[in-house]
Image: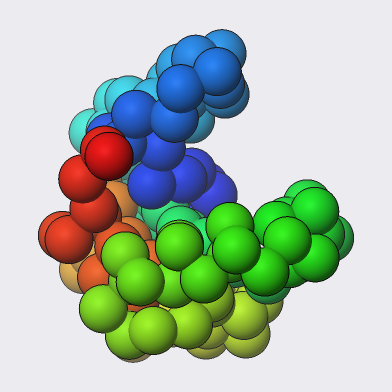
Amino acid sequence: MNIGSVHEDMAFPGFAAYCCSKSIVRVLMRNLSVKLGPLGITVNNVAPGAIATPINQSLLEDKPKLDALLKKIPLGRLGFPQDVAGLVAFLVSNKAAYITGATFVVDGGLMRSYHEQ
């Protein structure tokens, strides 16, 4: 199980190194899923969007920036750690035993509606 980011696919000006590192995680997951599949080992990737965690504290404290972001998220809110944790718990369970090599985006629809201004 890997934790990537929506920035595997979305531009994030000023954070090219972060985007590249998350893209590498996804490509590594794809390769490992093929390599380890014959051993019965699944490998997947979860790509969170804007999640209310300490890394986003400055965003949470900047109401104009937060409001602008929320307008781009169809569900109208930031995600919470439990939104990601529920998916991870499923993917590491036997209920997901036939899922491998996949990326699951947890972003409230941000990637589908986002556009640079």
Residue 59 sits above or below residue 63 on the image: above
Q: How is the image coloured?
A: rainbow
Q: Residue 81: percent from the left, percent from the top? A: 66, 76
Q: Residue 72: percent from the left, percent from the top? A: 31, 65
- Number of residue marks: 0
Location of the C terminus by quadrant is top left
Whether residue 94 is visible to the viewer of this picture, yes or no, is no
Image quadrant in which you'd find residue 94:
bottom left
Q: Nearer the viewer, residue 103 or 99?
A: 103
Residue 75 sits above or below residue 7 on the image: below
Q: Residue 91: percent from the left, percent from the top? A: 41, 72
Q: Residue at x 73, y 61 (%)?
A: 62
Residue 107 sits above or below residue 19 on the image: below
Query: Is 103 on the left-hand or right-hand side of 5?
Result: left
**Residue lying furthest front in this view?**
64
Q: Residue at x 23, y 64 (%)?
A: 99
Whether residue 59 is visible to the viewer of this picture, yes or no, is yes
Query: Is 21 on the left-hand or right-hand side of 33?
Result: right
**Residue lying furthest left in this view?**
112
Q: Nearer the viewer, residue 3 or 81?
A: 81
Image quadrant in which you'd find residue 95:
bottom left
Q: Residue at x 41, y 37 (%)?
A: 7
Q: Residue 35: percent from the left, percent from the top? A: 30, 29
Q: Residue at x 38, y 47 (%)?
A: 6
Q: Nearer the viewer, residue 71 or 108?
A: 71
